Amino acid sequence: MTVNPIAEPRQRLDGQLGTGSIVFMVIAAAAPLTVIGGNVPIAIGTGNGAGAPIGFALAAVILLVFSVGFVTMTPFVREAGAFFSYVTAGLGSRLGLGSAFTALVAYTAIQVGVYGYMGWALDDLVTYFGGPSLPWWLYSFATMAIVAVLGYRHIDLSAKVLGIALTLEILVVVVLDVVIFATGGADGIAVETFDPANIFTGGIGVAVLFALTGFIGFEATAVFRDEARNPERTIPRATYLAVVIIGVFYAISCWALVTGVGAGNAVAVAQQTLAGEGNLLLDTTTTYLGPIMRDVVQVLLITSLFACVLSFHNVIARYQFTLAQKSVLPARLGRRHPAHHSPSTSSIVQTVTAAIVLAGLALAGLDPLVGVFGSMAGVATVGMVLLMLTTSIAVLVFFARRPELVAGRTWGARVFPILAVVGLAFALWLVLSNFTLVTGGSVTVSVVLALIPVVAMLIGIVLGKRFPLDAEPDGAVSEATADQPTAG
């Protein structure tokens, strides 16, 4: 075996992120205000109407079940690679690299999609206050420049920025929810939400689908492993907290909007929003909090989108950093900034990649919402559900091959992963069967977009023979650590 004399020592990121900071970044990636203003009207208007809040709750349950196996395996995966590290440890380097490529495609897609949404939202905000209407992509690239600066620096700065933005947007929605329920809404508390006749309709699949889209990025807790203060405790806590907080927030806020306009009017009002003849969130805010708070919410929508895109930027940069450490990507991407201790080179490359994709979509003349955000969100949703399904299978295989590790972990190592496989397979069917609603395109275009994550997975599997991902000792820890306590 030939030793490379110029091989650089493996570098790791470091930091002192606590549970709260990681939860902030993960929830910021979910862009809660954006989901309440965008996904919720779609779930109500094209899904199961007044029963849509239950769809969000079901999605949260599916992801919480998945998280149990994910967290149970966490003490045995010692690198910040998230899904692909778990898949490598359980199913081998080929599927591991396939998962890594799928994750890069999914996160890049949703990030570019949010840049498109941001461009539209900023133009809408400026024109609402009497400013000139400019091309949406100007705002998108301006946002990208700010994200590039923050992503280049230490992760603690991004965490502070995300924390402030997230606190404000959650606070305003909580205030709206409380006022709606306190005043009784338009026609009293919408108990119709819990009527089985409203829940179990054909449209519940649409509600679950758009709820899952709103959870994209929650697994990023494991990406920040090297920068966590105490990863063995911080990562499990952050994962569970992120899923529970996001799920409860979505479900209650969706229920509040149904109550605010009245269960009998919810579908009609939501459909008017989709037709561009109103805005469920902003109009309801005006009714219950007044026009000034409506303006505040519209501004906070911008901060929500910014927090979202910054969080995704940080996640992608760290995926690339870890792959470079494994010689899958160029070594320069695996270099840490000497002062900021950030994956600075990877951050720059990620910005350039996003800029190229966004420029291509802009030159194609696509609409920023349907053409850019809708299609990219569709690609990301398929990719993330596929990744979670593969990861749950990896958890099962990992512990099946190491029965001595199962003692005291039966539920987390076997029962919940099996339930997760069933639930995620069902979720993937829901996503694909309703995919045109996500992309806003034709069946042909939707099929092509849905295949992008699958193709990325296949390319990774093929390249996995040439670039094997070593799962031991950097991936799965040895059996000598089997007596360590686990949160699962």
Image (tube, rainbow, N blue to C red):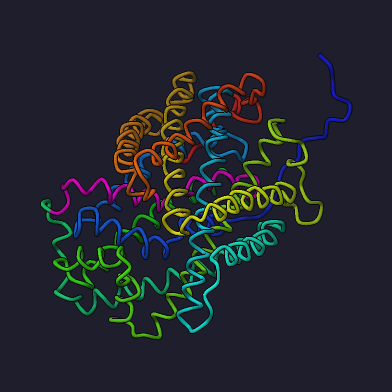
Q: Which residues are magenta?
A: 198-227
Would you identify the image quadrant in which residue 97 lies? top right
Residue 65 at what x, y percent from top left? 35, 40
Image point (62%, 23%), residue name? 463
Q: Nearer the viewer, residue 5 or 74?
A: 5
Residue 131 at what x, y percent from top left? 52, 81
Image height check: is 378 above or below 261?
A: above
Can residue 434 be spotted in the picture?
yes
Residue 263 at what x, y percent from top left? 16, 66
Q: Is residue 75 left or right of residue 465?
A: left
Magenta stretch encompasses residue 206: yes
Can residue 89 be spotted in the picture?
no
Residue 464 at what x, y percent from top left? 61, 23
Image point (33%, 75%), residue name? 176
Q: Nearer the viewer, residue 269 or 327?
A: 269
Magenta stretch encompasses residue 466: no
Image height check: is 103 above or below 169?
A: above
**Quadrant location of the N terminus in the rendered image:** top right
